[in-house]
Amino acid sequence: MATDHKTVADEIADRNPRSFEARWRMRVHRIADQPIWTHPLARVVAAVGAALLLALVVSVPLDLTGQLLFSAGSFGAALLLSRTPGRLTTLAMIVLSISASSRYMYWRVTDTVGFTNWVDACFGFGLLLAELYAFLVLLIGYFQTAWPLQRRPVPMPQDVDTWPSVDVFIPTYNEPLEVVKQTVFSAMQMDWPKDRLHVYVLDDGRREEFRDFCQELGVGYLTRDNNAHAKAGNINAALAVTGSDYVAIFDCDHIPTRSFLQICMGWFIRDPKLAMLQTPHHFFSPDPFEKNLDTFHVMPNEGELFYGIVQDGNDLWNAAFFCGSCAIIKRAPLLEVGGVAVETVTEDAHTALKLSRHGYNTAYLELPQAAGLATESLSAHVGQRIRWARGMAQICRVDNPLFGPGLKLGQRLCYFNAMLHFFYGLPRLVFLTAPLAYLFFSAHVFQATAAMITAYALPHLMHASITNSRIQGRFRYSFWNEVYESVLAWYIMRPVLVAFVNPKLGKFNVTAKGGVIEQSYFDWSIARPYLILLLLNLLGFAVGIWRMVAVGPSSEVFSTLVINMVWTAYNIILTSASLAVASETRQLRSTPRVTAALPAALRFADGKTLVCETDDFSQSGVGLRVPNELQLETGSEVHVSLFRSDEEGTFPAQVTFSGGGRLGLRFEGLSLRQQADIARLTFARADAWIDFWGNRQHDKPLTSLKSVMVIGVRGLGQVAANTLNILRGRREVVSK
């Protein structure tokens, strides 16, 4: 079961009722629970008063001393609130952050744009537009994530005869059979009446080995005579020849648990208007960031923020997105909107938008009930994000959620922010180069003193940091969003702008999964933009040092140089961290291991049995924790038994490693039935992914900044070492 989004303060208060945090929670709730707040007139008066107060706070002019005192007081209040548990205090922190940011933007627009020459105006207005974009994203982001719905499963009716029929679609194109097998095995074993569960492999590759595999298992195999509209067309073709009440869709590498349908379907019974329910996309293999930076299971990955917080926040506004996999859609509404959308390359989000326009409800259940493979290489990861960005820009043009019928304000804002997010490419590049305008050209992008810039900008940034840390701390660490965006900014900028101008350009590309990386290497082609940005910022930093020495600390220019030097140093950290991601590490396993302690038994040829437990498992083998004294010869044959409740499966295996209290086994000569049994006892367990979801330590901004700096230093070292190797004519690659 998914847990509440608790902060550190919540956890402290729950453990110790006498703590400072617990006492503060009691006082806040005592005020908030007063009967007066339920009176309509009181609410109107409070809303009008709050709006007038916010307008006053934003617009009142202050000198430097007054602004510093105001900033110190508001930030002190935010720090106090950060120690106070509860959602009400989160809302209070959001109000303080919006006040600080709005005040900064008001000051920027009214007091800092009096440019006297075209160079200042060009750089200055460019930076201002990027800041306005970031401010808008911040505001709508707060709107989305301030109050996650935290939907919970609804039990199915006791009478199994009333349960509806479900078609399970597994679309595939060019993925290897070994990747698809586990998904099919687990889909077949979902806890649902067998006469109302129909599994279909939708093979756009039209491969004989897939046909034979499906025939042997007794599952449906569907093809078509063309590949029009890629995945969307594949699903629509299957809709035309199947007929169950509901359709569950899984990418061919997304393995469902046996409880998937029972966990999700109850909401469709409760809400007749519900058309789509989405669950998280969880990955049991590391993505390129996690693999190349060695952060797998240490910090949240790029996608966890969306599935951990954003989707849950969208659900409050009835704007949960269909994400293409790990979801259930009701057939009748889907056919009513014309099937899966084919107008854009992000057919999933566009389909959800169409369902919402027709008055249907969508839902999100923050409970991982399936897991899949992440992209293996950074280039594949970038290609996938390019498709997402292009598709959202296409939707923004052809079916803009701000306009048209059928949507409420909350739905419009949630969909619009999802599209607006992928326009970050150009603003991010502006932020990565903005201080160079002053360091290289002496362009004054701010028509203000260094002290006033600091007094207004620093509170805006600090409030946003601690507020987002409180909201997102389980699923996104501070400063890492800048790393993700810096890596992708250059590559998504052009496709997004082109798609916005001409939405018909671009085609669906399949993200490769299940591959291997046989040799570590530094991806110079992917890294080229970051390398140029790094060199520019390093040069700018050197120029800044030279100018600081030249003018001296007594000059008025010196403080301006300091601000731009600090900004440049931060950009050097981000670009260096981006370069570290481009250092690809070896991945020899095409079937990644999943860490899990499951009951097991080792059965030897002489009849002896050793009870033990697993250290990890995959579809091709298993690692066991055994007594240190146990030593087996590599290549020796054994049988291993895996257990779940009262179920047991025994499988032949060969020893691949023995020593140090660990035994590595590779399954040998398994029949399809035995392979299905392995899936049932491992990947398909109902609780398979719960322990991996949102259970890391809550974000600490300063600690996160330190980790980004460490990664940045590593990236600099890797670039330097690989460059020296090339100059020396060596082929070795430094990846760590």
Image (spheres, grey):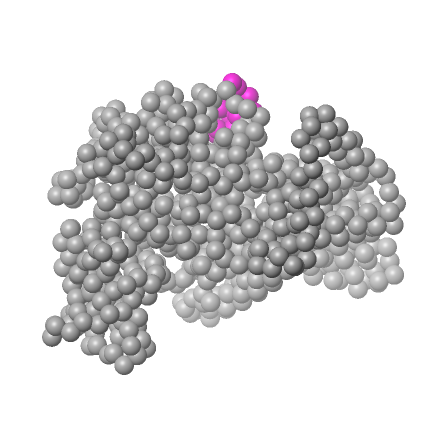
Compared with residue 398, is residue 107 higher up or lower down, i.e. above or below?
A: below
Q: What residue is rendered at 14% in x and 59% in y?
A: 669
Q: What residue is rendered at 37% in x and 55% in y?
A: 285
- Counting labels gives 0
Task: Kindly tell me whether residue 460 is visible in this rendering.
Answer: yes
- Residue at the front extreme? 35
Q: Provide residue 479's location: percent of width, then percent of height.
A: 59, 53
Between 470 and 47, which is closer to the camera in this rendering?
A: 47
Q: Provide residue 454's location: percent of width, then percent of height.
A: 78, 51
Q: In which quarter of the view is residue 87 placed?
A: top right
Between 653 and 543, which is closer to the camera in this rendering?
A: 653
Left or right: 495 in relation to 168: right
Between 590 and 300, which is closer to the camera in this rendering?
A: 300
Q: Provide residue 520's location: percent of width, then percent of height.
A: 39, 63
Q: Which residues are magenta?
A: 393-405
Q: What residue is rendered at 17% in x and 41% in y?
A: 214
Q: Provide residue 8's location: percent of width, then percent of height.
A: 59, 56
Q: In which quarter of the view is residue 573 placed?
A: bottom right
